[in-house]
Image (spheres, rainbow, N blue to C red):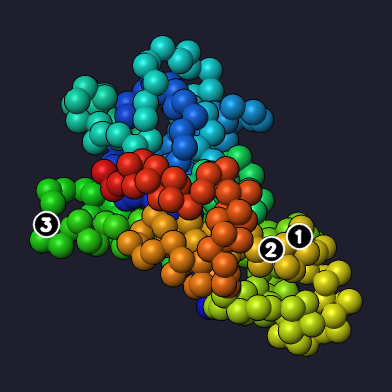
Amino acid sequence: MDVLSDVVSAARTGRPHSGRVARSAPFAQRFPPVASAGFHIVLQGTCWLLPSQGEPVALGPGDVAFLPRGSAHGLADDPSTPVSEPPATLTGVHDGRDGDTSADRPPTVVMLCGAYLLDGSAPHPLLNDLPEVIHLPTRVGRHRELSAAVELLGVELAGNARPGSDTILLTLLDLLLLYILRAWFEQQRTSGHSATGWAAALHDPAVAAALRAIHQDPGRQWTVEELGAQARLSRAAFARRFTHLVGQPPLTYLTWWRMTTAARLLRTSDAPVNTIARQVGYSSQYTFAHAFKRQYGSPPGTYRNHAGRSTTPA
């Protein structure tokens, strides 16, 4: 079981949105905070990302800017350009052919912009571990898979829809998200910034083995000793190492992941609540409902009814 893929699948709700945007200088666009993870990728030209906190970030061709929590930010041709345009939305981007560019003003920048809808009711700690803005500058020979996905997305969004475009776009957007996260975690590991946290946990053989075991079979009645055996460590050594890197004791994370898995099943299937309870390791529906309410603030049935109304794909 691939833990990163599993986490992304559990967090995703609805369909991702994307579009090709062309802008001519001068421009300065505001993006209010949203319950989505947003991205901007420069295809041609240059611009500046203006985070709500911190210094402006220069973006050039091939650069990726990812905002895991949909934080408020801006895009501008220059940090000094006054923001006078109405707020934009990551989930309703347009192609820039409605007056943003003209024959007299060729585009300063051409970008891919979009958003992923994520379940914010109990975000995975892996996603919480990410910074407000992830900037992945293009470099020759680095992040080749990410660069390939960006190029393919640019081709698909460049012209009129062709047969199969809907499925191709959704697949490429899924790939893009995973490649962004993979590139970030690998960058943290190679830069020496991942002594703790999920970047370190995913690359630690012992902890990664235990995480894979939990994700592969969350319904199993795991003990710390059994998870330690998966990690090939003693019970005490494993518990210390897991807690140090993941930030939670092993069985606390197991319970948390069980509830996250149950939430995904409640959103995406019609399986009875008692069936879902058994799938995630609870023989008592009452005990399961109590644990679920503790994490999500509502009983499983109420959560399912609300999720059915709020996460229907656009």
Which amino acid type is marked by label 1? Gln
3 or 1: mark nearer the eye: 1
* Residue 103 place in picture, x, y as percent: 18, 26
> Is 34 positioned to the left or the right of 289 in the image?
left
Residue located 83% across and 72% down the image: 239
SS class of the residue under badge 1? loop
3 or 2: mark nearer the eye: 2
Q: Is the Cβ of the residue at disc 2 closer than 8 Å to that at disc 1?
A: yes
Query: Which mark is first along the chain, 1 or 3?
Result: 3
Q: Which of 286 and 36 is in front in this view?
A: 286
Q: Nearer the viewer, residue 92 or 80?
A: 92
Q: Nearer the viewer, residue 183 or 218?
A: 218
User: Which residue bears the numbered disc 1?
Assistant: 248
SS class of the residue under badge 3? loop
Which amino acid type is marked by label 2? Tyr
Which amino acid type is marked by label 3? Arg
User: Which residue bears the numbered disc 2?
Assistant: 253
Distance CA(mark 2)–CA(mark 1): 6 Å
Query: Which mark is first along the chain, 2 or 3?
Result: 3
Residue 162: assigned label: 3
